[in-house]
Amino acid sequence: MCHTLPRNTLCALLILVLSLTGCTEWTYQRMNDPSRDVWQKPQGVIDKLSIARGSRIADLGAGGGYFTWHLARAVGASGTIYAVDIEERAINFIFKEMVARGTPNVRPVRAEPHDPRLPEPVDLVFSCDVYHLMNDRVGYFRSLASALRPGGRVAILDFHPRGFVLGLFGHRVQKNEVRREMEDAGYLLVDDYDLIDRQHFQIFAKADN
Ligand SMILES: C[S@@+](CC[C@H](N)C(=O)[O-])C[C@H]1O[C@@H](n2cnc3c(N)ncnc32)[C@H](O)[C@@H]1O
């Protein structure tokens, strides 16, 4: 029976089951698999973000920290990455990885679904494959504006809603929907990159900056 299902459908079903049951350590390891680099192009993403050394960045919905480690390298020893997640298991996983990788500029933060609980304002809120999971996104990002330093930005990457299963279960979000909601939350689109085939990649700044 499984042999008759297309590979994309099987992957989508796996993602769906994992998102309904919560992530395990295995899931975070899978998210960090270096084979992801081929399509995710992490260095290309980092280059587009034009990150200054010493910046403070929140990796919102850090998961296993796939982007956390790239961001940590970009800000250097004088910068700080807050690896923010609502899942205790993600935070524990990141603690272990921090020790293994020796990245003292990463600080894990256990968040609430409606509050990132950042200890200080940041220059950039970065989020990959998280936006579609969030509730009341307009309200969330409207209040997040006070956690941005002057000139602060919000980068949002998420998957294009392609394919029957993902479309059916709403496990994705349209690029224009992100833009419309962020404008409702008081932001302006400042960059829109066509870098990754599977994901849209938009950067926003507060409209009143
Ligand atoms: C699909 S994973 C993506 C992880 C990582 N960003 C990556 O690209 O590998 C989504 C993560 O977002 C977290 N998450 C979901 N809603 C969140 C929220 N409101 N605030 C912070 N984290 C959230 C989940 O717990 C999960 O670890």
Image: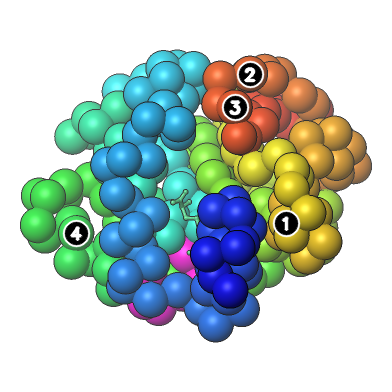
Residue type highlighted by circle 3: Asp
- Nearer the viewer's eye, disc 2 or disc 4? 2
- Secondary structure of the residue carrying tag 4 is helix
Disc 4 and disc 1: Cα gap in Å? 31 Å
Write the start and end of the magenta stretch as one range: 84-91
Q: Which residue is mark 3?
A: 197
Density class for disc 3 (Cα within 10 Å; few <14, some 14-19, many ≥20) is few
Disc 1 and disc 3: Cα gap in Å? 16 Å
Q: Which residue is mark 1?
A: 166
Disc with the residue nearer the chain's start (4 vs 1): 4
Q: Which residue is mark 4?
A: 97
Q: Residue at x 54, y 45 (%)?
A: 128
Is residue 60 at all visible to an observer of this figure? yes
- Secondary structure of the residue carrying tag 2 is loop
Density class for disc 2 (Cα within 10 Å; few <14, some 14-19, many ≥20) is few
Residue type highlighted by circle 1: Leu
Q: Residue at x 68, y 68 (%)?
A: 114
Residue 85 located within the stretch drawn in magenta: yes
Disc 3 and disc 4: Cα gap in Å? 29 Å
Q: Which residue is mark 2?
A: 194
